Image (cartoon, rainbow, N blue to C red):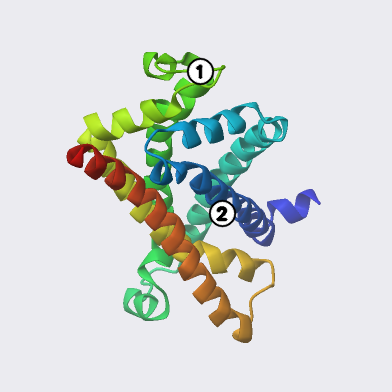
Amino acid sequence: MSNFLNSSIGKKFLMSITGLFLITFLLVHLTMNSMILFDSTGELYNKAAHWMSTNPIIKIVEPVLAIGFILHIIYAGVLTLLNQWARPVGYDKQNLRKSSTWASRNMFVLGSVVLIFLVIHISNFFWKMKFTGSELLDQGATDGVENAYLLVTTFFIDWWWIDLVYILGAIALGLHLTHAFWAAFQTLGWSNTKWRKRLDILGFLYTILVAGGFALIPIWVKIASMIN
C-alpha cells in the first residue's frame, strides 16, 4: 500500500479523492452562504451558521476536511515538481498549448491563488466565529445564535478590497475547477470517450454555479447596502 501511495499513480489517486471531497464541501459551503441572498434580516444565515458550528457531524468533518485540503496541497506541489523534473529539455510549448487548456497548464498557480483566498477567508470569518470571537458576532445575538450575518456583511460593505479578493478568488477557483472536475474522475478511471463530454458539461455547470455563487455574494451585499 505504501509503495502505491508513493508512486506517481498513487499520488494522483489521492489528489483525485481529496479533490472530489473538496468539490463536495464547496457545494455544501455555498449552499449555506447563499442564505445571505435570500434573507436580508440575516436570521436564515445565522441559523445555518449556528447549525454548521454545533452539528456533531460537521465537527467530525472539519478536521477531516482540513487534513484532506493539506494532503491536496502537498500532493499538488509534489506532482508539479515531478512533472517539471520529468519534462525533457526543449519541450515544445506550442504543442502543449494546442493539446491542453490554460487552466490545466496552470493548476498549481490557480491553486496557490485559491489558497491565499482561503487564508483570508479563514482569518476574517471562520477563525473569529470558531475561536477568537468578535463584537459584531455579539451584536443582536439571540438564544445563543451569534450574528454571523453582521460579521460577514460588514466586511463586504466596509472593505472594498475584501470584495475584490473574493471575486478574484472565485474566478481562480472556477478556472481551477474547470480542469479539476473531470480530471479527478479520469484519474479514478470513470472517464472515457463517452463520459468525457458529459463530465465536461457537468463540470462546466458546477463551475458556473460554485464560482458564480461565491462571486455573487459580496457583489449582492455591496449593491444592497448602496441601495438601502
Q: Is residue 21 left or right of residue 129?
A: right
Q: Is 164 placed above or below 80 here? A: above
Q: Which residue is mark 1?
A: 142
- Front label number (1 vs 2): 1
Pointer 1 local density, CA inside 10 Å: few below 14, some 14–19, many at least 20: few
Q: Spot the residue most to the bottom.
A: 194
Do we see residue 86 in this rendering? no
Q: Is residue 42 left or right of residue 24?
A: left
At x 69% / y 57%, what residue is drawn? 10
Of the 4 image quadrants, the one containing the C terminus is top left
Where is residue 97 shown, x and y percent of the image? Answer: 35, 76
Mark 1 in CB contact with mark 2 (< 8 angstroms) = no
Q: Is 3 placed above or below 191 here? A: above
The CA span between labels 1 and 2 is 33 Å
Residue 154 falls in image quadrant: top left
Do we see residue 168 in this rendering? yes
- Count how many numbered circles sit on residues in the image: 2
Q: Amino acid at mark 1?
A: Thr
Where is residue 129 shown, x and y percent of the image? Answer: 49, 23
Residue 70 falls in image quadrant: top right
Where is residue 151 shown, x and y percent of the image? Answer: 38, 26
Q: Earlier in the sequence, mark 1 or mark 2?
A: 2
Where is residue 122 shown, x and y percent of the image? Answer: 45, 31
At x 47% / y 60%, what residue is drawn? 177
